[in-house]
Amino acid sequence: MKTTIHHRAFQNSYVGLISFLLSFVQTIISVPILLTHWGNQPYAVWLALFAGFSLIQTLDTGHINFVGNQINVLYHQDKEYLKKTLGSAFYIALTMGIIELIFVLFLVVFNQIQNFLGISVGALDILQIKIGLILLIFTWALFGSFGGILHRLLLPAGMLFQAQWWGILYRFLQFLAIILTVILGGNILAVCITYSFVQILIFSLTFLYIRKKLPEFYPWWRIREWKEGLQNFKKSLVLTTNGIAQQLGNNGLILFISNFLQTSLVPVFTTIRTLTNTALSITNVFISSLLPDIIRFHATGEEEKIIIAQNANWFITGVVVNSALLLILPFVENLYLFWTKGILHFNLALFLLLAASISFANFGAGLYQYLVGINHLISQTIITVVRVLIILICSFIFLDYGLVSLGIGILAAEIISSVWLLIFFVNNQLKNFNTCLDKKFIFISLLPPGIILFVTIYFITINKIQWEAVVISLFLLTALYLFNWSILDEQIKVRLADLKRNIFKMPNNRDSEK
């Protein structure tokens, strides 16, 4: 018996919500511990080191995602061809890992690690940084790249639930390894060693689990063809480009700060960005649970349901994110100083700019996931590349303003990429159904980000938070969302009411989908 969309959204969000809460708790706990035991400078160096490691990893994540998508299709169509795809991918992944390791060794031999990470030789013993990065990349080359591909085998085999819990266990053990090492007095090299050990352990256990559950595909490297592997790698380059652009907009900004500003400012940027990104993470949990239904509507040509679902998404995520961003404003500085033990300086202007950018990013989150779901790679790549280019260009133009320059760049990038570009590309797809996004809902959904942008500019101008302005903004927001609720589709209202009841009590009897 089929379940209703709101039931699936609620049920499928469980693991996503647990994963989000785990990541959130890890961040809340790890920041004060690392700052207290290491201090700002070593913590900043660790962030730069890990950002560099993550950026290098991106070179083969496109290949991982492409082959993973192939596995999802071939598992139900041609398992023999799947075995060849898997075996070919094994050797390509190993080759990519070796190339990444050679790149790091090149940086080490020619003393370019400092320039790559943007750290000073006098900041810490550079030798432990070099050994640590080599160790991280070596472990990734042997286990991580192909492990990421093999993990995707669980999804079409009907083991999505198990795959999600393996991912949660992986992140939890990584967190535990880092925190315990730091508490016990370990330095950055010690953290790299324990982190790598956890990588080896969890991937080894995953390999054994997959071998036991899906023995027909083992040994995974048995059937191989270099031509097949190279063709898939070539096809994956669009995804790789997209992944690199995304990483440049995340970990790349950490290296930007350490190279063009000061390494010591990295923790300030990452912690403040973590605070603002938390709101968007909650949104993604909800969107990901509804995405399968939205994609089904696209595949079956039910264009009206696509638009209704998007309108509902704008309303729900808008209420959660925009209200939270305004409510936290009067308390955020004290919370931040308490969280970071007063070791880091709170940058009000940066926080306000990032908060405004999150409001606009939230508007476009559902639209972007729609493009991801229908596998429209060109639009994804254009949006991601434009976003990172705007961030970097604005950051260079306003570099004299320090971290605020990145805030300006991120805000400008989200307004253009998450609003204008996404509306353009999604409407372009909806033209196939002779329809488009509801202009009335677009306008109403953009008013709350507009209010937050106005408040941001005002507070930056006076350099403080005013209670009166926050209260007035909340009243305006409430009025807007009450009006928004009044024009929502009646079926959506019923489902949202049911979802609200399900949060407190999960019914035993599942209604069939009408």
Image: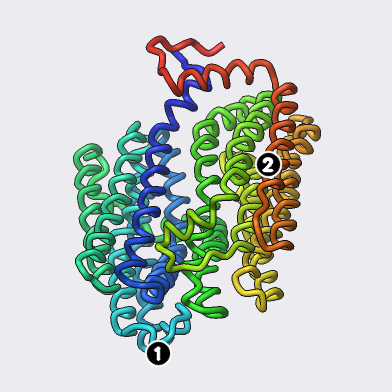
Residue located 45% across and 78% down the image: 117
Which label lies toward us, 2 or 1? 2
| Circle count | 2
Give the Cα distance between marks 2 and 1.
Answer: 57 Å
Image quadrant assignment for residue 427 = top right
Q: Quadrant of the N terminus?
A: top left
Q: Which of the two residues, 403 or 470, is positioned nearer the viewer here?
A: 470
Q: Residue 334 has which mark?
A: none
User: In this view of the protein, which residue sits in the foreground, 196 or 269?
Assistant: 269
Q: Amino acid at mark 1?
A: Phe
Q: Position of residue 283 (x, y in %)?
A: 54, 40
- Mark yes or no: residue 231 visible: no
Q: Position of residue 134 (x, y in %)?
A: 31, 75
Q: Residues within 10 Å of mark 1 (few under 14, many from 20)?
A: few
Going from the N terminus, do you reach mark 2 or mark 1 first?
Answer: 1
Q: Which mark is residue 471?
A: 2
Could you tell me which residue is drawn at 19 percent across and 40 percent down?
212
> Is 118 on the left or on the right of 330, as rendered?
left
Left or right position of 392 against 67: right
Which secondary structure lies at badge 1?
loop
Q: Residue 479 or 415: which is nearer the viewer? A: 479
Q: How is the image coloured?
A: rainbow
Q: Quadrant of the C terminus?
A: top right
Asked if the residue under mark 1 is in contact with the one under mark 2, i.e. CB atoms within 8 Å, the reply is no
- SS at badge 2: helix
- Residue at 65% across / 44% down in the picture? 364
Asked which quadrant contains residue 496, the reply is top right
Q: Is residue 414 above or below residue 119?
A: above
Using the image, tell me which numbered label, if any, was put on residue 110. 1
Query: Which kind of residue does numbered mark 2 sit on?
Result: Val
From this viewpoint, is residue 182 visible?
Answer: yes
Label 2 crowd bin: few (<14), some (14–19), many (20+), radius 10 Å: few
